[in-house]
Each structure stands twice: as structure tokens, then as C-alpha cells.
Amino acid sequence: MATPSRRAVARALHAVFARGERVPERWDQNLAGADAALAQALLGVCLRRWGALQAWARPKLKDPKRGLPPGSQVALAIGLAQLAWLEGVAPHAAVNEAVDLASDGELGFPPHKGLINALLRQGAKDPSSLRADLDALAGADLTDFAAWAMETALSPRGQEDRVAEAFARQNREPRLAFRALHGEAPEGLVAEPLLEGCLRLTPGAAFPLPWLQRGDGMVQDISSQALLAFLWDRPVTRILDACAAPGGKTTALGLRFPEAAITALERSPTRAARLKDNLAARRVKAEVIEADAAAWLAASDRAFDLILLDAPCSGSGTLSKHPELAWIGGGLDLRDLAKRQRALLEAAWPRLAPGGLLIYAVCSWFPEEGIAHRTAFLGAHPEAREAAIWDSRFGVKDARSSLFLPDPLTWKGEGFQGFALTRA
């Protein structure tokens, strides 16, 4: 029987490619230590190189057009990925474990044990040649959805001809970024030159788990950190984080404005509980309310000096962290998402005090989810004003801008866009 780490990866991949679902949030919860590290690395490379892995096998099948069923595709991908990219995994172990997966009745995979065995043994003869062949098939990893996202991101800059380059940058393993919350950061973390307070792991440094568990630091993508690196010189005493879980931005706001009263909304009971736990661990005080943001805002009479609306979105900017989106994102209804986002924006606006600041953001490349809302909202609300709070590091060449729009060809974090408004 295959090891628990490989079985966990197989279940996660099957959810994506057989059922069109995102990777389950706690797919690796029963793994620890080396098993967890192997599973995370294996899942990441399978998702990022899925197109190449299947393209390598397809010509070798009796019926290339029909291909393999999803379960067999999963078993084959797990075996090939280990042979080509994962150091420290013996070729015979990679082959045998994948063959076991191919005939695992508990996982529900159809038995193509002989075929999977033959294909993997062919690849195992020369793993370096296998890797070269797979790298040559990199274009197969660029799905229609990913190409659409990259073209959209590059269009404002007239760089649509650099889609493959932008995708290669977005499709790689994300570089973890950290932020110190209390006291000094541990050894092995160094400053990220682009952004004050942002930290990176030095090569070979140990992951700072004890530091994170004490609540003295947190993992937070550079885009999320940069979004809140805004220039604002007015007093802030009441803050609303309208879509708050898991709490990274709530934490950052609480540390920047320690005297402010913070309200954090989250509709999911599970995510609201996680939000409370994270804020408590990081020693940040906030009123956490389990509620639908649009409904709560419509019923509330509170006024806030600062509102952060990190709206639900397509997530197209998070391909590095969620590479499965390249394969399942094509079914997204952008019109429906944009309608819900605009409704949240309209519900939040009356809760902004005169002279206050509203920051809208999405981790998406699509203008329908971001800057298009800015244009439409300003046209519908003459009392709304652009708030130029970001500098030229964050995507717009002006010295100060109300737009947060990083360049996908140079930016080191997730794809993000946002805008800032104030009430006259």
C-alpha cells in the first residue's frame, strides 16, 4: 500500500481533476514532519506541471485521444513527478508507490497497474532525460484560463506578447514572506528590500515554526503587506475589516493602529473560529462577528474611519499558491462575482465616516473585479474621492496613486489590485 503522504496527495489531486474542486483546505492535516514536507512538495509540482506530465504520457497510449481516466492520471503524475523533480526519492520507490496507487481500491482508482508500471519504468531508465523532456513540454501547463488571466494582467501595459513569461513567473513555487509582530525576528529571516517590515527566509534557513506558534510573527504574502503599506495621516479610531478571515490583514491593521477599535466580519463559522484563534495568538484585540458582510452592513448604523474590503473573488492572482485554479478556473462566472463585489462595495460605503478611508482589494488580475469597480463607483457617487495613498513601488508610475496595481512581470508577490476612496 502507498504511504500516507502519497495517498494524501492522490486524494487532493483527484478532488481537482476528477471533481473540479479546489484542493481541500486541510488535505494534509494527518501528516507531520518529513511526510508533510514530501506531500506538499509533491502536490505542488504535480499541479504546476500537470499539463506536461499528461502530455508526456499521451503519445505512448494506445488511444491518445481518449487518454487515461482521472485516477490513473493522478497515479502516473505522482510517479513521474518524483522521478523528474524530487531529490532523495529512489526511482524504484517512486515507481512502486505509484503502481500501488493505480490499483488502490480504497481510493477508487481504476486498475491500470500494468500500464502505469510500464510508463514509469520507461521514465525511470533516465530521470534526467525525463526531466528535460517534461521541461520541453512546459507550454502544456499554460491552460486557457491561465493565459486569459495573464493576458488581462499584461494588457494595461501593452505587454500581451509576454504571456508565457508572466505565467512562468506566476506558476513557480511561491516565495514565503513573513512579518514580525512582536519583538525581533529570529535568525534566518532577512529584510525584503522592496517593503519595510517584510521578511524572507535565507537559503537553507530553518522554517521559524516556534516563532510563528508564539504569535511573534506570521506568514503573509508581500502583496497583502504592501496593500496596507499606505500613506495616511488622518486619525483612525474605528476600523472595519469586512471579509476578515484568516486575519492577516486584521492583525496588520491592529498593530499599525493599536488604539483603534476593530470590527472583523466573517460569514463562515469555521473561518470565524480560526480568525478568533489567530488574533488571540497574535495578541490583537478585535470584535469578531460571524455574519454575512452585505447583510450586516445593510443593518448596521456604525461609522468607521477605515474600511478594508478584501472582497471574495476569482483568486486568479494566486496561481503560485493555488495552482489548481489554472485547471478549474475556467468555469468561473465573472459577471456574478463582479455583481456580488459591487453589492459589498455599495453596502460598505454608507458605513464610511466623512473623511474616512475605504480600501477595496481583490487577489485577481481581472479588471472586472477591481479597477472597473472604481470607475463605475466614482461615476455613481459624486461624494466619493480618490485617495492617493500608495507610491510608485506598487504598480503605478505616479508619485502617489489611488490605484494598487502591481506588474505581473516584476512583482514578487501574488497578483493583487485595489483602489482607495475617501468621502468628501
Image: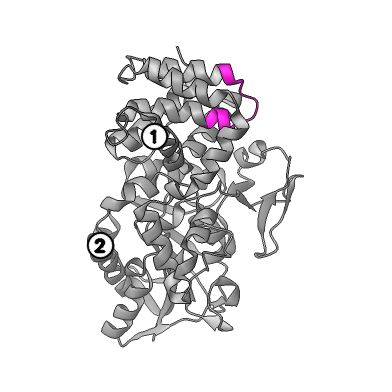
Q: Depth check: 140 or 285 in front?
A: 140
Q: Amino acid at mark 2?
A: Arg
Return the residue at label 1: 59
Q: Quadrant of residue 371?
A: bottom left
Q: Which mark is residue 340?
A: 2
Residue sitting at 24 percent across and 57 percent down? 333
Residue sitting at 60 percent across and 48 percent down? 176
Q: Which residues are magenta?
A: 81-92
Q: Amino acid at mark 1?
A: Pro
Q: Residue furthest right?
A: 187
Residue sitting at 44 percent across and 75 percent down? 156
Tag 2's secondary structure? helix
Residue sitting at 57 percent across and 68 percent down? 229
Q: Which mark is residue 27?
A: none
Q: Depth check: 43 or 215 in front?
A: 43
Indicate which disc, 2 or 1, sits on the residue closer to the N terminus: 1
Residue neighbourhood size for the residue with mark 2, other residues' Cα within 10 Å, grouped as few (<14), some (14–19), many (≥20):
some
Q: Depth check: 101 or 400 in front?
A: 101
* Magenta-span inclusion, residue 45: no
Residue 63: % across, % down: 29, 30
User: For the residues carrying marks 2 and 1, which lies nearer the camera in this image?
Assistant: 1
Tag 1's secondary structure? helix
Taking 92 as reference, is 296 above or below it? below
